[in-house]
Image (tube, rainbow, N blue to C red):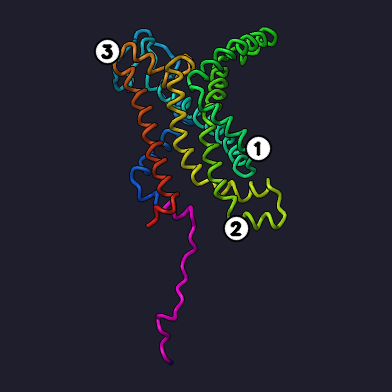
Amino acid sequence: MSAIPLSTIETVEEPVSLWRDAWYRLRRNRLAIFGLVIVVILAFTAIFGPYLTPYDYLSQDLNARNVLPSMSHLFGTDDLGRDVFSRVVFGTRTAFLVAVIVTVFAVLIGLVLGAVAGFFGNPFDRVIMWLTDVTMSVPNLLLVVVINASLKSPISKWMEARYLETLNPFYRETMWVDFILVFGSMALISWPPYARLVRAQVLSIRSRPYITAAQALGLSNWIIIKRYVIPNALGPLIVSVSAGLGTAMVLESAFSFLGVGVNPPTPSWGNMISDGLRVWQHYPHLLAAPAAVLGLASVAFSFLGDGLNDALNPRGSK
């Protein structure tokens, strides 16, 4: 029996998977893995950290005011004797909560409006792009200040009236007013870049042969958008979302620093930086701790976003 030539043997190649191939390229990017590890640690801290801290973030000890970092207080204490480490950890929850919720709402708004504008064209495209340009032309800080100044007082008065009627302590929790206003105002200024990105992807996708085939089969436009257009536009959107989370954290801290975000006593990296900036020459740890964590989070999301961009870009494959 003669041997079968090797040239005639068909090699069976493993099916190519976009996501498996992207994960392989991502793992080779050390900076991206570093960013991913930091993001996972921050997420774990946001979820479980407040239950593991040695002190309550509101607990005051006037006999231990402005204590320098030590084994009992890793980041020292502030001017009210509160443990800075516990407040930074709880501030991680605030930052993640704001970043995730704001980014989710902004992505949903941008995804819907961008898909409609790109797939249906005029007049939807003209109106949505005009709205996008108007929103992006308004200064972010001005819009947030207007929303907070216009709505915070009426909402606070309404909650106070409900408390007097029901005596429900929930209506005395002004923290929720801050969160709602921050979520709403930041979502309103964050959706235009996602809408533009999705629109550009949809304009490219809608001319593909499989979209024409789906239309020839009689599928409705909304089914085509849901099944074929949006899933194929998610790659660049995922990259944008990873960077958007870091941007939302920085924006929330910036607004809290300026007094139009999350207000004390709820810990926020922004209002902690604002407090520490006034006394940093005498107590530098009050500024260094929240600023270092905010900087680390921003760099981590930047590294992760760059790594995802390289991993999900087919031209990056060797």
What are the residue bounds of the magenta stretch?
A: 2-24
| Residue mark closest to the camera, 1 vs 3 | 1
Q: Nearer the viewer, residue 98 or 204?
A: 204
Cα separation, mark 1 vs mark 3, equals: 58 Å
Q: Is residue 309 visible?
A: yes
Indicate the secondary structure of the residue bearing disc 3: loop
Any magenta on residue 258?
no
Residue 221 x/y as whole percent:
68, 47
| Residue mark closest to the camera, 2 vs 1 | 1
Would residue 250 appear left or right of 220 to someone viewing this image? left
Dividing the image into 4 quarters, which one contains the C terminus?
bottom left
User: Quick one: which residue is furthest to the left in this view?
Assistant: 281
Dividing the image into 4 quarters, which one contains the N terminus?
bottom left
Q: Classify mark 2: residues with Cα within 10 Å, few (<14), some (14-19) or many (20+).
A: few
Q: Is residue 183 above or below residue 37?
A: above
Find disc 2 in the rendering and name its residue: 209
Would residue 310 appear left or right of 198 to someone viewing this image? left
Find disc 3 in the rendering and name its residue: 281
